[in-house]
Structure formats: structure tokens, C-alpha cells
Amino acid sequence: MKRMFWMGCLLTGFLSFTIANTLHAAAFEQAFKLTKINGECNVMTPDSKVFAPAAEGKAYPYGSKISTGRKSSVIVEFSTGNSCRVLASSVLIVTEDAKDAKAKNGFLRKI
């Protein structure tokens, strides 16, 4: 009986945590920003033909390419609570869906 009680408490806590994290996520912004840049990280915006060093907290338009160097990483923040980490030696292209601007796509390639 005690075991069922504790399992119920654990399940309730897990569901509360999951729901809180889901509700915390905000709608996607018109641009994404890069945070927690560690090591070499470069960005090529859609209107550029060359990579430039990434800037902490700067907003970048969708269609940009993110490149990380050896032993490097960066967090791509789409909105509050919606982010992903790009690890070392990778290229990520972040785009908007052509049919639905609310949908965001990422194409990841390890270099």
C-alpha cells in the first residue's frame, strides 16, 4: 500500500513538472538568438556569403547557418523555453517552414 502511495506521488510530481515546462514555453519569435557560446561559433545570415563570429544574445533571421568549431558549442534559443544545443564540429541551418511560419526546421550536419 505504501509503495502505491509513493508511486502515485512520484507520478504526480513528474506530470506537474512536465506540464509546467510545457506551459512555460512561449511562442516562437521572428528571429532566434544564440546564447552560451563556448569556443568557436560562426554565423552566416541569408544575406551574407561568408561566416562571421557569432555574438552572444544577438538575434539572427531564420535561414541562417550556424557553424561550431572543435570543442565548441552554442545554444540556439527560439523563444523562452524553446532551445537546442549545437555541439562541436557541426553546421545547423535554421529555417521557417514555407507553408507554416509557425513551424521551424533545423538541418544538422556534422563536419
Image (spheres, rainbow, N blue to C red):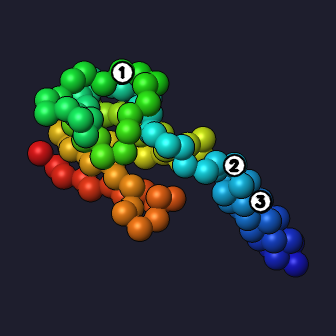
Label 3 to label 2: alpha-carbon separation: 12 Å
Label 2 close to label 1 by CB (< 8 Å): no
- Tell me the crowding category of disc 2: few under 14, some 14 to 19, or many 20 or more residues within 10 angstroms, Cα based: few
Q: Is residue 19 visible?
A: yes
- SS assignment at label 3: helix
**Secondary element at image label 2:** helix
- Compared to residue 88, the image places residue 51 above or below, namely above
Badge 1 is on which residue?
A: 55
Q: Which residue is mark 2?
A: 24
Picture coordinates of residue 72 (x, y %)?
26, 30
Indicate the position of residue 20 as horizontal and vertical percent values. 73, 54
Q: Quadrant of residue 54?
A: top left
Closer to the chain start, of discs 1 and 3, is 3
**Residue sitting at x 21%, y 44%:** 91
Which residue is pictured at 45% across the width and 39% down the height? Answer: 32
> Viewer-proximal residue, 42 or 31?
31
Q: How many marks?
A: 3
Q: Eyeballing the image, is 104 above or below 78?
A: below
Closer-to-camera residue (91/73): 91
